[in-house]
Amino acid sequence: MNLASDGVDLIATFRAKTGMAKTVRDLILEYGGLVRDEPGNRFFVVYTDASDNAAFAIAERYVDQAAFDAKLFGEAGKEFNVALGDLIEGSGSELQLAPSASKGVSGCARSPVWLP
């Protein structure tokens, strides 16, 4: 079975405004609970920098493009992005659709690997 094939992976990175790191963290964790319950979500993992709790990265995987689109255009995602927008630096998250380096490797783990 090829667990790494197909699917859509997304990495979002952003930085909380000064004094907003805890608020951003709480918002992400609440939203993450909703996303993880979506039928097409394989994982939603939140990372912070060990030396900078205002720097965030979120890694997400969806079973296919339709599942990703449902999340992307869903009401919860829109509400999350509006709320997050006022709390982070810049004009929004940096988003990267990230093809898996292990795509096509049979037996690859479903869990993400985050390299420092």
Image (tube, rainbow, N blue to C red):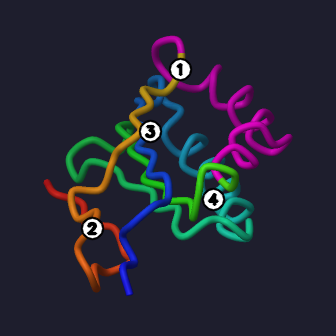
Q: Mark 4 or 2 closer to N-term?
A: 4
- Which secondary structure type mostly characterizes the magenta part of the structure? helix
Q: Disc 1 versus disc 4: distance between alpha carbons?
A: 18 Å
Q: Mark 2 or 1 closer to N-term?
A: 1
Query: On the picture, is 112 further left or further right than 29?
Result: left
Crowdedness near tag 4: few (<14), some (14–19) or many (≥20) residues, C-alpha within 10 Å:
some
Total count of labels: 4
On residue 32, the disc is 4
Query: On the picture, is 89 further left or further right than 111?
Result: right
Q: Disc 1 versus disc 3: distance between alpha carbons?
A: 10 Å
Q: Nearer the viewer, residue 43 or 54?
A: 43
Residue 36 in the image: state x and y as whole percent. 65, 68
On residue 12, the disc is 3
Question: Mark 2–mark 1 contact, CB under 8 Å?
Answer: no
Residue 39 in the image: state x and y as whole percent. 73, 70
Query: On the picture, is 71 further left or further right than 108?
Result: right
Crowdedness near tag 2: few (<14), some (14–19) or many (≥20) residues, C-alpha within 10 Å:
few
Residue range in magenta is: 68-91
Q: Mark 3 or 2 closer to N-term?
A: 3
SS state under label 4: helix
* Kind of residue at badge 4: Gly
Q: Disc 4 versus disc 2: distance between alpha carbons?
A: 28 Å
Where 9 sits versus 87, above or below?
Answer: below
Label 4 vs label 2, nearer the camera:
2
Who's the residue at 74% across and 61% down the image? Answer: 34
Question: Mark 1–mark 4 contact, CB under 8 Å?
Answer: no
Crowdedness near tag 1: few (<14), some (14–19) or many (≥20) residues, C-alpha within 10 Å:
some
On residue 104, the disc is 2
Quadrant where the C terminus sits is bottom left
Label 1 sits on residue: 92
Q: Mark 1 or 4 closer to N-term?
A: 4
Who's the residue at 52% across and 61% down the image? Answer: 44
